[in-house]
Amino acid sequence: MYTRSNHTPTVRGRRPATIVFAVAATLLATATACTAPSAESDRLPGATGMSAGALGEPNAAEIRSTIEAENQRAAAAMVAGDLTASLANYSDNAISMMPGMPAMRGKAAIEQGISGMMKEVKMTAATFTTEDVTVAGDYAIESGSYTMTMQPKTGKAIDDVGKYMSLWQRQPDGSWKIVRDMNNSDLGMAPPM
């Protein structure tokens, strides 16, 4: 006949309560370390990362400001039809993933893809709005939204709104370049012609 003992069963010599406590303490310590806000993130919504101070540590606010300025230069270059200036933010090994087409791998492929688009439409307005920048060492992950108006050679202007995510990397000269870029429209797909 089976009899029930009054002692708590053990797992490899430890009581389950001890294991549960250890796991809970580890999770709590991890969560606290990962979610504790920095003084910088308290002051700057949408800009997180290391604060300035120690040698070589990136400053999230400065990086965000740099990215926003570079995006504004790129938008102005797109409207001006200046292909070279509109691609200045991309590193030589960048990958751009736009909807409805294969990934463009390398700055030369991105230039070819954008050049083809610019032959078909003129960008009459472009705005990039940085909504968040997260800094991790020599990388900055930017997410944001865009609005664009494009005028095809024939037909009505096309307005587009959407979102994007770009991975920026600090270059040896201290500048920041896009190494990965993707976007998609908030609007539905165009009906087939």
Image: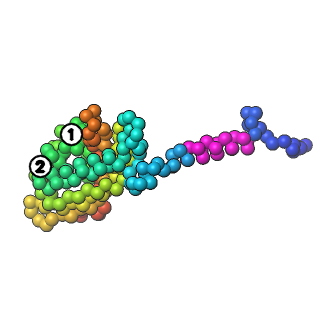
- Residue 83 percent across, percent down from the top left: 13, 47
When the figure is inspected, residue 192 is found, relative to residue 75, above or below; the finding is below
Q: Residue at horizontal 22%, vertical 53%?
A: 72
Residue 79: numbered disc: none
**Badge 2 is on which residue?**
82
Q: Residues within 10 Å of mark 2 (few under 14, many from 20)?
A: some
**Badge 1 is on which residue?**
107
Could you tell me which secondary element the residue under label 1 belongs to? helix
Q: Tell me if residue 104 can be seen.
A: no
Q: Residue at horizontal 30%, vertical 38%?
A: 170
Q: Give the side of residue 106 with respect to residue 14, left or right.
A: left
Could you tell me which secondary element the residue under label 2 belongs to? loop
- Residue 24 percent across, percent down from the top left: 64, 45
Please state the extent of the stretch shown in magenta in the rendering.
16-31
Which amino acid type is marked by label 1?
Answer: Lys
Q: Residue at horizontal 25%, vertical 34%?
A: 173
Residue 28 shown in magenta: yes
Along the viewing direction, whichever of 189 and 96 lies nearer the viewer: 96
Q: Give the side of residue 152 with respect to residue 95, left or right.
A: left
**Is the residue under label 1 in contact with that under label 2 (CB below 8 Å)?**
no
Q: Tell me if residue 156 can be seen.
A: yes
When the figure is inspected, residue 188 is found, relative to residue 108, above or below; the finding is below
When the figure is inspected, residue 121 is found, relative to residue 141, above or below; the finding is below
Q: Quadrant of the N terminus?
A: top right
Q: Give the side of residue 31 with respect to residue 101, left or right.
A: right
